[in-house]
Amino acid sequence: MELIRIQKIIADSGYCSRRKAEQLITDGEVKCNGHPVKLGDKADPVNDLITVCGEKISAEPVTLRYIKLYKPRGYVTTMSDDLGRKSVTELLKGIPERVYPVGRLDKDSEGLLLLTNDGALANDIMHPRKHIAKTYRVTVCEKVSEDIIDRLMNGVEIGENEFTSKCVVTVLTEEEDRTVLEFTIYEGKNRQIRRMCEAVGLNVKRLRRTSVGGVKLGMLRPGMYADLTDKEMQTLNAAVGRTSGRRSKGGSTKQKRGNSGKW
């Protein structure tokens, strides 16, 4: 059988995304036939024993699942948390597949989070070269001038020699003590929106992601999730440049309540 890169075998198994698999390999958490592996190593997914953190990786095809979740504030976007904080996976009760978050939303942010066990699609969505559009509704405590809007749209410095790319920023509503902005960005730097606002002297009061790759939050409320519909899958596949893709298991549009106790 043809040998395959180990990070791809891990991603195809549904364990995690390819990017996360590469990090696990770098961290020394992956072994093949009992021996640590390094990036670029290949293996036979059927005859070689691959383990991640001591857990055997199955070579059997997995049922692919594509889910959108309204992440509430106060939850971390990880599979588990060493500090005992609430994880988004706690909201996905009754889902037998091992799905994982595509990208992140920080603990104090809320809104649309995609989860899947399709490693190839997750890698496409997160890859910087794909320039996947992500839209956020951001409430700040100040009035926002045209000059600040122009600075945000043309890129600002958010760290030492770290600049944001051009984006779209629109004023949705403006009141005496707050302004609601809509950001559409095409990259995914760590806490990017908050750091952009901080760079121009704006204090973020609320941050909610409303769209990723054309898939919208829709009528979901905090803690609720739904399988992506066929139409949403077509939109997402088009955004990453796929000509076709497999439909979400069940293709259900029914909203389900997570473990947050909220509808």
Image: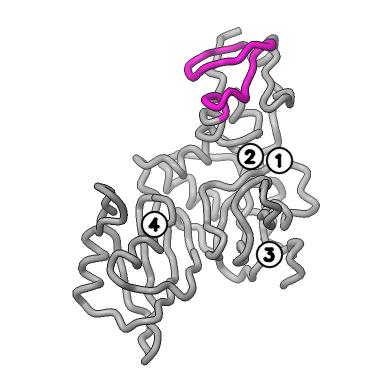
Measure how far apart labels 3 and 1 are at the Cα level. 18 Å
Q: Secondary structure at mark 2?
A: loop
Q: Residue at x 37, y 42 (%)?
A: 128
Give the image location of residue 116, x and y in percent. 62, 44
As drawn, the label of residue 117 is 2
Q: Is residue 29 magenta?
A: yes
**Segment tinted magenta in the rendering:** 24-43
Quarter of the figure that contains the C terminus: bottom right
Q: Nearer the viewer, residue 54 or 69?
A: 54
Measure how far apart labels 1 and 2 are at the Cα level. 6 Å
Give the image location of residue 54, x and y in percent. 72, 24
* Dot placed on the residue nearer the N-terminal end, 1 or 2: 1
- Looking at the image, how many numbered discs can be counted on the residues? 4
Q: Which residue is mark 1?
A: 98
* Dot placed on the residue nearer the N-terminal end, 4 or 1: 1
Q: Secondary structure at mark 3?
A: strand
| Res 21 → quadrant | top right
* Dot placed on the residue nearer the N-terminal end, 2 or 4: 2
13 sits left or right of 178 in the view = right
As drawn, the label of residue 224 is 3
Q: Residue at x 27, y 49 (%)?
A: 160
Q: Are marks 1 and 2 in contact (CB under 8 Å)?
A: yes
248 sits left or right of 181 in the view = right
Q: Which residue is mark 4?
A: 192
